[in-house]
Image (cartoon, rainbow, N blue to C red):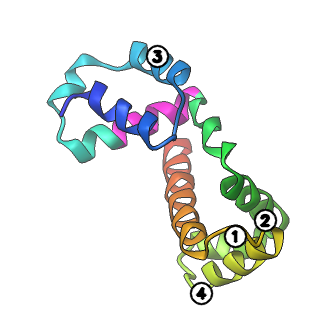
Amino acid sequence: MSVGEVIMEFIDSEVMNQDYAKSLYRLVDLESNNFTYPEQVSYITLLMLKQGLYNKFESTPIRQALRDLFDQNPVEYNKLKSGDSKLTGFFVGRSMKISKNFNPKDVQKRIAEMIEESNYIDIWEE
């Protein structure tokens, strides 16, 4: 799979829009086409984070609600990032109070994604 195809997957999954993808593609090292698929995803994710193209992540209502909850509950958020998985339920419950239309399984999935993304940012900033 090429880097371009990985970027297209990011667009299809609404991780980024086409404008971000065009900007990102201009920055991609063509040698990355030789990477394995997981390496390509990691490379593109890190490049997105470094270039500030990850703001699109906050565009979905669930992600925005979670971002707000993480900001309002920094102690619980840091414990969750450190591996206290029972706090996932805490954040799912709080998000359901914000909107009854959220699917709890979708919220759990978004929490896992956002924790993984924040770990990429933490690694990058070290």
Closer to the chain start, of discs 3 and 4, is 3
Which residue ends up furthest to the front in the rendered image? Answer: 101
Amino acid at dot 3: Lys
Distance from disc 1 to disc 2, alpha carbons, whole Å, reads 9 Å
Amino acid at dot 1: Tyr
Distance from disc 3 to disc 1, alpha carbons, whole Å, reads 33 Å
Q: Are the residues flagged by discs 3 and 4 in contact, CB closer than 8 Å?
A: no
Distance from disc 3 to disc 4, alpha carbons, whole Å, reads 39 Å
Q: Are the residues flagged by discs 4 and 2 in contact, CB closer than 8 Å?
A: no
Q: Residue 1 versus residue 28: which sits nearer the camera?
A: 1
Q: Is residue 49 magenta?
A: yes
Label 2 sits on residue = 69
Closer to the chain start, of discs 3 and 2, is 3
Q: Residue 70 versus residue 10: which sits nearer the camera?
A: 10
Label 3 sits on residue = 22
Q: Are the residues flagged by discs 4 and 1 in contact, CB closer than 8 Å?
A: no
- Determine whether 83 is above or below 45 in the image: below
Q: Nearer the viewer, mark 3 or mark 1?
A: 3
From the top left corner, tell me how far across and down residue 12 is, in percent.
Answer: 42, 38
Label 1 sits on residue = 77
Q: Secondary structure at mark 3?
A: helix
Q: Are the residues flagged by discs 1 and 2 in contact, CB closer than 8 Å?
A: yes
Closer to the chain start, of discs 1 and 2, is 2
Label 4 sits on residue = 86
What secondary structure is the magenta-colored segment mainly? helix
Q: Which residues are magenta?
A: 42-51
- Determine whether 25 is above or below 50 in the image: above
Q: Quadrant of residue 31?
A: top left
Closer to the chain start, of discs 4 and 2, is 2
Amino acid at dot 2: Leu
Q: Secondary structure at mark 2?
A: helix
